[in-house]
Image (cartoon, grey):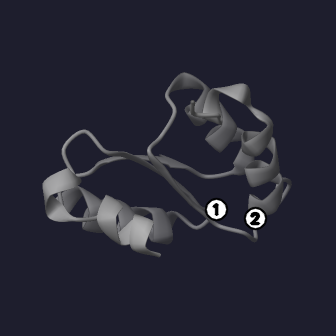
Amino acid sequence: MNALRQFLTPQTTVDKNILIVDDTPANLQLLTVMLKSQGYQVRSALNGAMALLACNRQIPDLVLLDVVMPEMSGYQVCKQLKNWRCWIKG
């Protein structure tokens, strides 16, 4: 939790790229408005496949991922992302 709190401090918002993944458009809209008003760069995806494409184009600094989605759950998306070598730092 401390890492998330540190990530979300106002002085670190510049150039922070957040990907929001949710199959409910109202949730995407609300989170996008809230985060953009705090200075974050926000991208959104309506499903797991779109999230994977978005991550493939540009690796986000943070992914806010809905767990319950049709076709591909948030757990499945997370599992695939964890297997990508580009996420490994070092």
**Residue at horizontal 75 percent and vertical 64 percent from the top:** 69
Q: Position of residue 27 (x, y in %)?
A: 48, 71
Q: Mark 1 sits on what residue?
A: 23
Tell me: 64 left or right of 87.
left
- Disc 2 to disc 1, how far (Cα)? 6 Å
Residue in the foreground of this view, choosing between 29 and 1: 1
Q: Earlier in the sequence, mark 2 or mark 1?
A: 1
Question: In the rendered structure, which amino acid carries the disc numbered 2?
Answer: Met
Give me the residue at 31% from left, 45% from top. Answer: 16
Q: Can the viewer see residue 32?
A: yes
User: Does residue 28 appear to the left or right of 34 in the view shown?
Assistant: right
Q: Residue at x 31, y 65 (%)?
A: 6
Residue under numbered circle 2: 69
Examine the image and state in which quarter residue 90 appears: top right
Residue 34, by quadrant, is bottom left
31 over 81 or under it: above or below = below
**Element assignment for label 2:** loop
**Image x and y of residue 89, in percent:** 57, 33
